[in-house]
């Protein structure tokens, strides 16, 4: 009976942890195929929990129950090995850098350079984001800033500020954006700044590009990312 009780407790602990949204959010970006793996773990341990509870309460043939308890331990080891094998590796850098990413709307940073920002975070750099508008023209202004915050949290950014400059009319508040970007640069002192390209058809993206260049006019490292709206003139030299 004791092995079955242990098996039931182990199954319960695994299921509670795996089904926790906090745990899933924390791990899903670092494990390849996290969603499918999560579903497999839930299915296997749900069955094992039922079997272990059956053994612990009804107490049928001891040999069968012992085999179920052993299967629970084996499953734990197997899934642990699979998770370790599917974990996405990250190389730790010797010198930690600070990176500031400046975008026009919520979702610009994720779409244009989200993977790069995530890789920088995973390799030990500190990354912050700055968004100029709440994107009210392209969506719900009450939802998009919160979505941007969740995206930043998922990517591992240490901070994200969303300003409320007028969506689609950012060129009318250039001086205000320059002051906002200058304030972020003074506070964070980034080693590298990411922003939109000059070769971008979206007027807000181009306005943010110009404002960033003005705000960071004395900075030595400004890199422009490829938004979906860039033209064929975008010619990258850093990969």
Image: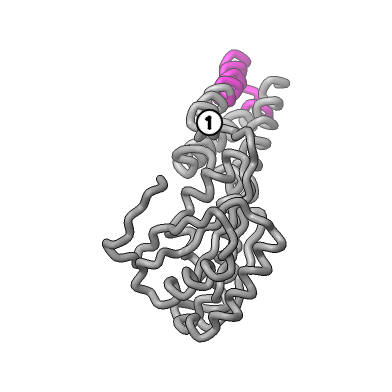
Residue corresponding to mark 1: 83
Q: Could you say where residue 10 lies in the image, as x and y percent from the top left? A: 67, 30
- Quadrant of res 70: top right
Q: Could you say where residue 116 lies in the image, as x and y percent from the top left? A: 48, 48
Q: Secondary structure at mark 1?
A: helix
> Taking 191 as reference, is 137 left or right?
left
* Residue farthest toward the left in the current orientation of the protein: 232
Q: Could you say where residue 143 lies in the image, as x and y percent from the top left? A: 56, 73
Magenta stretch holds residue 72: yes
Query: Which residue corresponds to the image point at 45% horizontal and 81% vertical from the top-left?
Result: 168
Q: Residues within 10 Å of mark 1 (few under 14, many from 20)?
A: some
Query: Which residue corresponds to the image point at 54% horizontal and 34% vertical from the top-left?
Result: 90
In front: 82, or 174?
Answer: 174
Report the span colored magenta: 55-76
Magenta stretch holds residue 68: yes
Quadrant where the image shows the N terminus: top right
Query: In the rendered view, would you say 60 is above or below 199?
Result: above
Q: Magenta stretch mostly in which secondary structure?
A: helix
Coloring basis for residues: one colour
Query: Which residue corresponds to the image point at 58% horizontal and 78% vertical from the top-left?
Result: 142
Query: In the rendered view, would you say 137 is above or below 58?
Result: below
In front: 158, or 70?
Answer: 158
Query: In the rendered view, would you say 45 is above or below 149?
Result: above
* Residue farthest toward the top in the current orientation of the protein: 63
């Amino acid at each position: 009976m004791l092995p079955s009780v242990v098996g039931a407790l182990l199954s319960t602990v695994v299921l509670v942890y795996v089904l926790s949204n906090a745990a899933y959010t924390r791990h899903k970006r670092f494990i390849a195929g996290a969603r499918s793996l999560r579903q497999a773990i839930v299915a296997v341990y749900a069955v094992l929990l039922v079997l272990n509870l059956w053994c612990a309460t009804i107490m049928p043939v001891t040999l069968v129950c012992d085999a179920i308890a052993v299967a629970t331990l084996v499953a734990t080891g197997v899934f642990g090995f699979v998770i370790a094998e599917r974990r996405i590796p990250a190389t730790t850098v010797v010198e930690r850098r600070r990176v500031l990413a400046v975008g026009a709307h919520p979702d610009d940073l994720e779409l244009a350079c989200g993977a790069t920002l995530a890789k920088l975070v995973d390799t030990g750099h500190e990354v912050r984001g700055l968004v100029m508008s709440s994107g009210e023209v392209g969506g719900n202004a009450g939802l998009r800033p919160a979505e941007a915050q969740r995206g930043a949290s998922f990517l591992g950014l240490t901070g994200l500020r969303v300003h409320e400059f007028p969506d689609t009319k950012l060129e009318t508040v250039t001086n205000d954006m320059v002051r906002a970007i200058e304030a972020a640069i003074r506070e964070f002192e980034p080693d590298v700044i990411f922003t939109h390209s000059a070769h971008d058809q979206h007027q807000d993206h181009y306005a943010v590009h110009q404002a960033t260049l003005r705000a960071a006019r004395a900075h030595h490292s400004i890199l422009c990312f490829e938004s979906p709206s860039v033209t064929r003139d975008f010619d990258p030299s850093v990969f």
